Image (cartoon, helix red, strand yellow):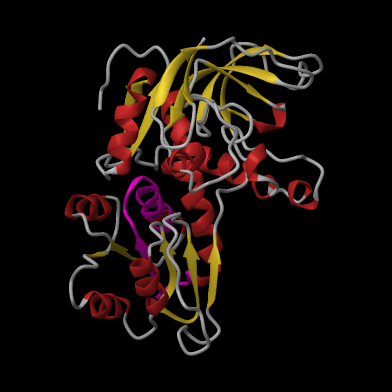
Amino acid sequence: MKAARLNEVGSDFVIEDVPTPEPGPGEVLIRIGGSGACHSDLHVKSGEIPGVAFPHTLGHENAGWIESFGPGAEGNGFEVGDAVVVFGGWGCGHCRFCLGGKEQLCNTFLWGGMGPAGGYAEYMVVTSVRHLLRADGLDPVEAAALTDAALTPYSAVKKALPHLVPGTSAVLIGAGGLGQYGVQFLKLLSPAKVIVVDTDEKKRQTARELGADVTVDPRDADAAEQIRAAAGQDGVAPVLDFVGIDTTMALGAGAVDRLGIYVLVGLAGGSFPFSFFRFAAEAVMMTSNWGTRNELEEVLALARSGRLVSAIEQHPLSEINEVFERLATGRIPGRAVLVPGTPSSNG
């Protein structure tokens, strides 16, 4: 089969002919319909995420069709040819995190595409049927992006929901691929006023089209004052930061009001000097790491209802290096999905 391989840190992907994998006991072979190009893979390419064994096939946002079952994997309600969505946060299945339903917190290097080979290929092995969800009418290309680009912000918004009572305001920083879903989830799941912060006017416009009540350019000298004015006297209950550089963390942490919550999603490596006098009274600062399988089921249900707008570009696997170059320079307005065998780009 064809696979896009990353052979070393800092290199480009190389399309190679590799053996089509055989599913082992309990495993399932999936024919890839689409695999989302995720910003976190840029951090793998650059070496910022250590521990990946090269050469490696990345790709953790996947959907497609069941090709075959390994021994013992049959008889679980799925059949060969079924369209499926792959939950990628694989764990050991036995620790307290996995048994508690938060398998994505078990071990990053058990995730599909991080330790095991991922979906930047024509086929991939899924280590257990429990990681499969039915597509049930969803296009596997669009559904692939939902497994991270939608699941991650959905999980972050759910962490903020207890703070999002009527009359409150939420700040969302970064209206890219994940942030655009985040705006929609805030509007679908809460009564809060949504204030979106982004440096790109096109992304601010997209956020407004998706339901944002107010947008702010953080480069404005009075950006913090604009946020405070929009939030009113009750202030900002949650901040969701999908960027995570020093300046966005400082802006977001400064916006959170008493008993609020700041949720860091972005992987840009920034920091904020957390201290008693630098943060609102009894507010919470936390990270949000992907999401659970059950949360993905909820995301898919929202997608089937027609209430999610997905800005997705489709590209053949052969264009993977061009896609990642555009991703690195912020030139993909929504999400890009790599499709094995696609003859030409539609992005």
**Which residue appears at 38% of the width and 74% of the height?**
250
Left or right of 313: which side holds 118? right
Depth order, front residue of 146/329: 329
**Which residue appears at 18% of the width and 76% of the height?**
221
Furthest toward the bottom, the residue is 277
Question: Is residue 115 magenta-colored?
Answer: no
What are the residue bounds of the magenta stretch?
Answer: 164-186
Residue 139 can be seen, yes or no: no
The correct choice, above or below, for 260 with respect to 98 in the image is below
Q: Quadrant of residue 112?
A: top right
**Which residue appears at 70% of the width and 47% of the height?**
106
Q: How many marks?
A: 0
Depth order, front residue of 306/226: 226
The correct choice, above or below, for 87 with respect to 292 in the image is above
> Which quadrant holds the C terminus?
top left
Q: Quadrant of residue 131?
A: top right
The correct choice, above or below, for 106 with respect to 55 in the image is below
Residue 61 can be seen, yes or no: yes
- Residue 201 point in image, percent of width and height: 17, 55
